[in-house]
Image (cartoon, rainbow, N blue to C red):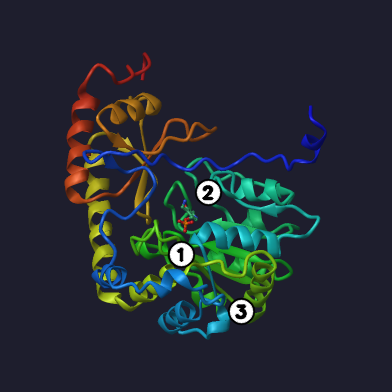
Amino acid sequence: MRGWEKYVRKVEPYVPGEQPKGNRLIKLNTNENPYPPSPKVMAALQTMEADALRKYPDPASGGLKEALARYYGLETNQVFVGVGSDDVLGMAFLTFFNADKPILFPDVTYSFYPVWAGLFRIPYVCPPLDAGFGLHKEDYFRENGGIIFPNPNAPTGIALALEEIEEIVRRNKDVVVIVDEAYIDFGGQSALALAKRYENLLVVQTFSKSRSMAGVRIGYAMGSPALIEALENVRYSYNSYTMNLPSQILGVEAVRDQAYFAESVGKIVTTREETKGWLREMGFSFPDSQANFIFASHEKVDAAKLFNALKQEEIYVRYFKQPRLENFLRITIGTDEEMNQLREFLERYTLSDAVRPRPAGT
Ligand code: PMP
């Protein structure tokens, strides 16, 4: 071992979903929006001036913060923006989770949480979800150094009622509670109303899913001015020009086009509910997702085999080789046409010999 190696920070990195190349493929593996961003965003992109690249960006992302603050009925000092919600969440871990006590997040959740905890040396405990992947608020009524969970949860899609979130926040006033609302625009109730009342609650959202801008990388957090100021202080101590100027400009356009946003989200929700119907008819079971994906399993189908069979057909979904999850596939909601192709394949597959025979006597 070379001398310097012992000083290298040892981390277990997050593994992002695949980004396969090809025109024909159907990509239902990373919860992207199947529809393009607002035409206003595309128009701004086409007319972007060279200065947007030549100059340093506004380090405060003032225009984007203002657009978001106006949209959500907040002051700009209640909004923080970052390069995707991953950036915002990472910054929030670094800023708020500095107790010696462990932070809490569910055992089945966004797999980046343990990675940030590892990177920043934050101790953590993962209260297990119940057999149906339900989160019990009582598991969070214990001493801790902070709390984070997505709502709706990932990869299950299950939304927690606002009253339950409020009780978790109310009983944990000595620590920061982060609600990761990456999927909230597709269902469930946002905790933003609570963030206006509880100083210790941070709500994090993203442009990656409901606003079709995963490639632009915009995430944001909303909370009390005290929390936002703490986040800003850490951000300015790390990288003051976090968000590039083109992203700031495109983000403002996206927030302004409320009608397009509502239409695109509405289409995905309709397709999701239709997909639930035919998946159920085929014998799949899944939690009642409020997000833009469905976490499905089938008692006669081996999920890993199905994952590979789908891949052969150039249909990409997400498989997590993890305890409790190995018999599920997370399927992002695509366009109706993409979902029809998936449906045709699954119909053939579930009737074929490839499916696992039912164990004797069941
Ligand atoms: N939170 C959750 C629960 C997610 O599933 C994702 C998507 N991987 C993110 C945050 C991060 O998304 P982004 O960085 O694109 O905003």
Q: Amino acid at mark 3?
A: Ser
Q: Amino acid at mark 2?
A: Tyr
The residue positioned 22% from the left and 20% from the top of the image is 352
Spot occupied by residue 34 in the image (x, y as percentages of width and height): 27, 53
SS of the residue under disc 3: loop
Q: Is residue 140 left or right of residue 325?
A: right
Q: Which mark is residue 218?
A: 1
Whether disc 1's CB lies below 8 Å from ligand 1 is answered yes
User: Mark 2 highlights which residue?
Assistant: 110
Whether disc 3's CB lies below 8 Å from ligand 1 is answered no
Which of pointers 3 and 2 lies earlier in the amino acid sequence?
A: 2
Q: Is residue 355 left or right of residue 196?
A: left
The residue positioned 65% from the left and 72% from the top of the image is 200
Total tally of numbered discs in the picture? 3
Spot occupied by residue 216 in the image (x, y as percentages of width and height): 41, 61
Q: Is residue 127 left or right of residue 53?
A: right
User: Mark 3 highlights which residue?
Assistant: 224
Spot occupied by residue 87 in the image (x, y as percentages of width and height): 56, 59
For the view shown, which residue lies furthest in the top direction?
360
The residue positioned 35% from the left and 74% from the top of the image is 49
Find the distance from the CA under tag 3 to the CA under tag 2: 24 Å
Residue toward you, 63 or 145: 63
Q: Quadrant of the C terminus?
A: top left
SS of the residue under disc 2: loop
Q: Amino acid at mark 1?
A: Ile
